[in-house]
Amino acid sequence: MKQALHWILDIGNTRTKLAAFLDGELMDVWMDREAEQVANEAMESNALPSRMLVAASGEKPEFWTTWNDRWQASHLHPEGLVNLRASMDLGFEVRYDSLTTLGLDRLANAAAVIALEADVPWMVIDMGTCMTVDAVENGAFIGGAISPGIDLRLRSMYAGTHSLPYPENWQELGGKGVAMHIGNDTLSSLLAGALGGINAEIQGRMEAFKKHWPEFRVAVTGGDASFLEVDDPRPIFADPNLTWKGYYQILQNVE
């Protein structure tokens, strides 16, 4: 039986990433120039995936615009290239008023947890450049909150003041548990404000969720998810590939 190869192209604000799924399993992820090289080689060797989802948060780079045109001209099934939009039928309900500005990664995270368990409420935490905390209820995305991520908090304090430094090695220090909540000098106080502050925010949001959904589940993803400390007995479902899996699920749902 022929194996099904699907691609997900994620064009973000700063990086472009390409992921390959084979029979539903995430096989590889390439970034920026490497992703372009993989795509060109697949085009030249006529080894393109059967379907591909493009999730672009802004304008496509010129390379990918041209490459997508080549797909349409050469692929046996040009309709297999799907440009994701929040207004599409994604296979689940989206209760959000401004679909044109809704981050596609937030929808992907929702799709992933709905595929895991659709009949329970979810709190989905994505810790990246910005931190999003979203609610999924009865298989529907109902919205959430966006706030600065850890690095953005540190950079904003550096950019917005005359004397506060930017701790270049904050990830190393944070990984050691340095000043998660109380700092004893300026550097560690900055870390306590950013790392400890984001954890305090999460804890507060969890308390708010409990008032509406006492038995909600928690899913965590994103590049800075390792810095999350949650004081709650409920199990935390952590998956660094949650967003990729959600995009793949959406690709299976859209026509």
Image (cartoon, rainbow, N blue to C red):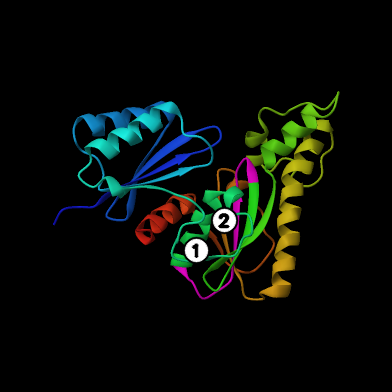
Q: Is residue 103 magenta?
A: no
Does the image show residue 33? yes
Q: Position of residue 102 (x, y in %)?
A: 59, 51
Instruction: Name the residue beneath numbered marker 2.
Output: 220
Give how far apart the Cα atoms at labels 2 and 1 are: 10 Å
Q: Which residues are magenta?
A: 116-130
Q: Is residue 235 above or below residue 193?
A: below
Q: Is residue 11 above or below residue 119?
A: above
Instruction: Name the residue beneath numbered marker 1.
Output: 113
Which numbered marker is on residue 193? none
Of the 4 image quadrants, the one containing the N terminus is: bottom left
Question: From the viewer's perspective, is 147 left or right of 39?
Answer: right
Q: Position of residue 82 (x, y in %)?
A: 37, 48
Which residue appears at 48% of the width and 54% of the height? 242
Q: Is residue 177 above or below residue 167?
A: below
- Judging depth in this view, the residue of 254 and 245 nearest the camera is 254
Question: From the viewer's perspective, is 14 left or right of 158?
Answer: left
